[in-house]
Image (spheres, rainbow, N blue to C red):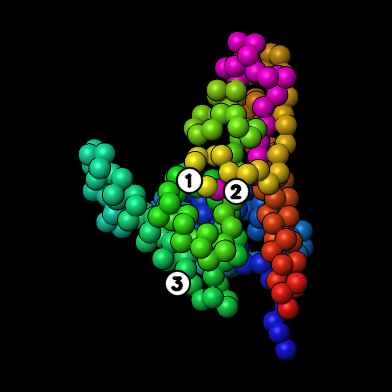
């Protein structure tokens, strides 16, 4: 008898882990059917996401660029910095792919507040095994790639340069070009006159949990459908 279709999810987080918690809660409520989080990986030792994982009974692991010996503390040489990142990325990909293929290796990786940019030495071997990687970014597709996206959208709104007075959030596939992968789901958010940057940030963040859950459920459903079609 063949095993039932299932989408195994690995989550990467760096901080508080509220988006990770949203996924945990959605899974518990049955809003992401036939899926489970097999592991959490963090790159900051004090990330509260690990406490959330422990409460949910999800294994977690700390793996850091500097603490695990890839990059010397205080290193400034660009070539050495890039070499360190390449080796860290490759080691992290190897770690993911070493997980048991039948019980723990993920079908989907969700970057949920992961404050680190992956390069080809992580993404290529992961893609080669057919594992999808998604990320949440607080901007619309093709707008404000990279850091401080909300700040830049707000500044453009204040200057009368924001297209249709709208910014937004998206969940997108992760590729080597930062925040330029194909969008999975997009939500527009209109900027309001008289609103502070902090108020806009709060409003944008209030939509993140639902969007990351919806996008994860969408892709998990596609992965499960593909598994069933192959049986």
User: What percent of the width, then of the height, locates residue 25?
Assistant: 69, 57
- Residue bounds of the magenta highlight: 154-174
User: Is the residue marked by circle 1 packed among few (<14), some (14-19), or many (20+) residues within 10 Å?
Assistant: some
Is residue 113 found left or right of 193 in the rendered image? left
Place of residue 142 in the rendered image (x, y in percent of width and height, measured from the top left): 60, 32
Q: Is residue 227 above or below residue 199?
A: below
Q: Is residue 193 above or below residue 105?
A: above
Report the residue marked by disc 1: 176
Q: Quadrant of the N terminus?
A: bottom right
Q: Is residue 193 left or right of residue 86?
A: right
Q: Which mark is residue 98?
A: 3
- Where does the image place residue 226, in percent across and percent down from the top left? 72, 67
User: Which dot marks residue 173?
Assistant: 2
Q: Earlier in the sequence, mark 2 or mark 3?
A: 3
Q: What separation in Å lies between label 2 and label 1 (alpha carbons)?
A: 10 Å
SS under mark 3:
loop
């Amino acid at each position: 008898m063949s095993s039932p279709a299932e989408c195994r999810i690995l989550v990467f987080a760096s901080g508080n882990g509220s988006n990770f918690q949203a996924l945990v809660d959605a899974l518990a409520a049955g809003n992401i059917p036939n899926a489970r989080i097999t592991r959490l990986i963090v790159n900051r030792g004090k990330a509260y996401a690990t406490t959330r994982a422990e409460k949910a009974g999800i294994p977690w692991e700390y793996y850091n660029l500097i603490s695990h010996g890839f990059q010397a503390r205080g290193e400034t040489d660009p070539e050495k910095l890039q070499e360190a990142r390449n080796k860290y990325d490759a080691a992290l990909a190897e770690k993911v792919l070493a997980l048991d293929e039948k019980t723990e290796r993920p079908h989907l990786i969700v970057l949920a507040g992961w404050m680190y940019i992956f390069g080809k030495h992580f993404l290529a071997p992961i893609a080669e095994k057919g594992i999808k990687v998604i990320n949440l970014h607080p901007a619309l597709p093709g707008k404000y790639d990279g850091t401080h996206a909300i700040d830049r959208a707000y500044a453009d709104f204040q200057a009368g340069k924001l297209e249709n007075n709208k910014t937004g959030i998206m969940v997108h596939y992760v590729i080597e070009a930062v925040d330029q992968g194909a969008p999975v789901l997009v939500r527009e958010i209109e900027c309001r006159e008289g609103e502070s940057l902090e108020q806009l940030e709060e409003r944008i963040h209030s939509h993140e949990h639902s969007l990351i859950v919806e996008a994860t459920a969408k892709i998990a459903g596609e992965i499960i459908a593909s598994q069933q079609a192959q049986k």
